[in-house]
Image (spheres, rainbow, N blue to C red):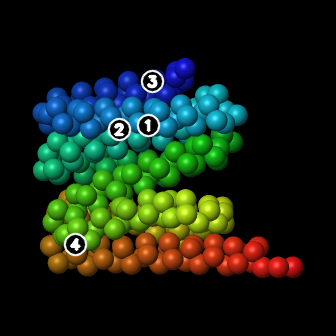
Amino acid sequence: MINPGVFLGVLVQLALLGTLDAVTGLGPLGWLAGAAYGLAVGGFLTYGLNRSTARSLGPADAVTLARSGLVGCVTALVVDTAGREIVAMVVIASVALALDAVDGQVARRTGTASPLGARFDMEVDAYLILILSVVVAQSLGPWVLTIGAMRYVFVAASRLWPWLNTPLPPSMARKTVAAVQGIVLVVVASTILPLWAGFVVTLGALALLTWSFGRDTWWLLEQHAFTAAPA
């Protein structure tokens, strides 16, 4: 049975799509993409709640769910207009990125941080970066998709090498690099930078992301080698 909070989140997603339709004239493809995203998020949260000790979403999860609704709108715009509604997309994505700093604070201040909430927050971040990389790739080339795909490649690799699933220690550098990706992609997507400048900053963001994943992978490899070494 679907959780009432999750069900409300799906309804909010549909309401946001309706508002977006009234403003930009969202077409059938946009509606389909946005609704499919909302249902997928609902399924993810329902599955997560059923497997966790929590039976409802916390206040921080509600913030992340609202942010997820905005990401669903970005998805709808990208699929429906191939990123042509630049102003609307940039504004919505910027708000979603700004709210990323809110849900963590809410979780800490209310003492409601949870593994499910942290995973939900991370998945919303990763997906927003993926969809923004699709937009920027249209002007800079398919290599930009590497930014959006990198985390998913890492997750796929962890299926082959389970030691990649070892929990990583907290890192401000990792959080900063992740935040930079979203900011850079939104700025470049807005077209306020010349094409050459957009290329340079996006390449720099990719270099930072590669360094961050490389550093974490090396740390995980060292931990795996240490635990696998005979006593």
What residue is drawn where x is 82% and y is 79%? 230
**Callout 4: 10 Å neighbours few (<14), some, many (20+)?**
many
Could you tell me if the residues under marks 3 and 4 are in contact, i.e. CB atoms within 8 Å? no
Are dots 1 and 4 in contact, CB under 8 Å?
no
Amino acid type indicated by mark 4: Gly
**Viewer-nearest of labels 4 and 2?**
2
What kind of residue is marked 2?
Answer: Tyr
Which residue carries the number 4 mark?
198
Q: What residue sits 34% from the left and 44% below the top?
A: 71
Tell me the quadrant of the picture where the N terminus can be found. top right
Helix, strand or loop for disc 3: helix
Residue ID for mark 3: 8
What residue is shown at x 50% (from left), y 52% (from top)? 122
Where 223 falls versus 188 (above or below)?
A: below
Q: Is mark 4 on a helix, strand or loop?
A: helix
Percent position of residue 40, x then y = 41, 36
Amino acid type, callout 1:
Val
Q: What residue sits right under mark 2 in the picture?
A: 37
Q: Residue furthest right?
A: 231
Q: Which of marks 3 and 1 is nearer the N terminus?
A: 3
Q: Position of residue 181 (x, y in %)?
A: 38, 65
